Amino acid sequence: MSLEILIKANDGRGMGHILRALNFVNYQAFGDSVKVLAHSGFAVSLGQLTRRVNIGLVEDMKYRVNLDFNPGQNVYLKEGNTNFNQNGLKVTDDVIDALVNYYFCVTDNTDSHTRLVYIDDQNAPESVFIEQIARVLGVKNPGTLKSNAPNAKIAFEIETQIWDRVGVYSIGETRRECFDEVDYIHLSSDIDFFKKVIGNYKFSNYQHKIIPMGFPIARWIIDLFDRYRDDKNKRKSAKQEILTKIGEAPDKNLVYCTFGGGAGAEELLEMLVEAAAIRKDCVFGLTDGKGDFEKEFRKKGYEVEEHDGFKRVRSKENEGYLVLMKGVGQKEHLEKVACADVLLQGTGSGGTYESIRAARPIIALPLNRPGYEQVIKSMGIEILGGGKALYLKSVQDQVKSLVQMTTQYGHHLEGIGKLCTTESMCNAVEYALSNKERCIQNLTDLDTKMSCFADPLKTAESLKMMAAGAEVAEIIRRCELKSTYGIH
């Protein structure tokens, strides 16, 4: 069978985009007609794909192009909350080569047999405009997506970022032009969850292109969460085993802390270890697969004790410690999510939706990312009663801007969330433990009443229908999707 569907799933900071693709590409609906292009740094995780799925590895040097800025600023290094070059990045031949490799891999892998180009690429609209990127870089034009794949439809996946990139709040014409150019907008977020934060938002002229899928979670993950949710003894036993392995009393509360790729979480480490030392009834376990957090703690002068399979970071101010947990596979990580008493985490897409599905109380701590991506999800967690939102100093401008903009349209977010301090972190943990059953019920309702999650089989089927050129309304009908866009 010839290659018909190309999926570019890349994420320079974490694994959210790649894991989203992994959750639906394995299914028989595709046969051997799909190829996934992804960051070579995550090659081990891509090993989860079945042999029938073709894999193309793309080196990601984190250089990007922003077509909305002037020459000299539009090539930048993707760091922190920067989406353009403020510091005069020197565009060397190596930088150009890295950008050509990153963006042009799509045209390199498409031809007249391609029926669908599906871009799930950090919500980056410039990925659709290859010829403009070639002009910025001063390199040979490889052609447009449509000239390289003349028989293909183009789909663009986007999540909460659709809000600050389309419609009345949009910043930058490339974002609008992207949605004008593509045939389908695949929305991996639940619109009702979305509107609880931003109000009755209008999607301008793009309603007829939006396919509201929700976030695809693999069935084996759903089964795992359901087993722990339905069997309290199993969950209690699993938690006690985790605590025993790290030398803790089995009756303590487990606060499982996880921040995806970790970029931006350095700001909260000191608060985290002090809160862990203060809350004697809890064990704060922080995942540190690459050892980056340990390096940060040592750099800040903290004592790090070596133990068999884990480490302890000693508080400077109180008698106590934070536990650094070694990196584990996806299944073991999700088991910790499923049996923790409290989840303290960043709000990247994959981790947030998995935690909602696991229905464990959440302390949502958005990291500094472009736009309002993580802030929106954190506010949603608190508004809908699933836990508390805390904001680092580095996201205060985002929070303030979001509150101001939504207020203009009659939606008020003042008072949602607090500045993250050691004290507010301890208070949030107390709230989550004292209101555990209520939080669990509210998170369960997010699943059953709001349909936050997509059936991966239906997601796969929707891509096949896009490749066949089906109308959006037909895809929504056939895949039994909830639509609040006036499409029936």
Image (tube, rainbow, N blue to C red):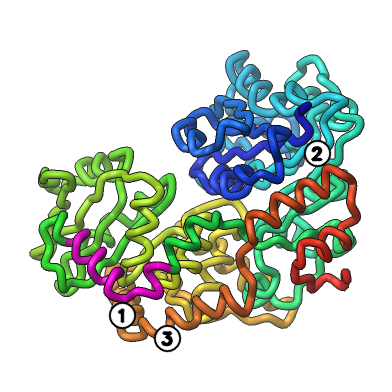
Q: Pick the residue in front: 134 or 285.
A: 285
The local crowd at label 1, few if under 14, some if 14 to 19, many if 20 or more residues have their Cα within 10 Å, is: some
- N-terminal of the two: label 3 or label 2? 2
Q: Is residue 42 above or below residue 82?
A: above
Q: Could you say which quadrant of the image residue 277 lies in?
A: bottom left
In this view, the residue in front, 105 or 135, is 105
The circle drawn on residue 438 is 3
Q: Which residues are magenta?
A: 227-243
Spatial CA distance of label 2 from label 1 is 47 Å
| Tag in front: 3 or 2 | 2
Q: Answer with mark 2 or mark 1, whichever residue precedes in sequence.
A: 2
Name which residue type carries label 3.
Answer: Arg
Q: Is residue 485 left or right of residue 380?
A: right
Q: Which mark is residue 116?
A: 2
Mark 1 lies on residue:
433
Rendered residue at 30%/69% (across/down): 235
Expressed as whole percent of the image width and height from the top left, the position of residue 39 reads 55, 32
Q: Looking at the picture, tell me which residue is in the foreground, 233 or 277.
A: 233
In the image, taking residue 281 as reference, residue 141 lies left or right, namely: right
In three-dimensional space, the C-alpha distance between marks 3 and 2, rounded to whole angstroms, equals 44 Å
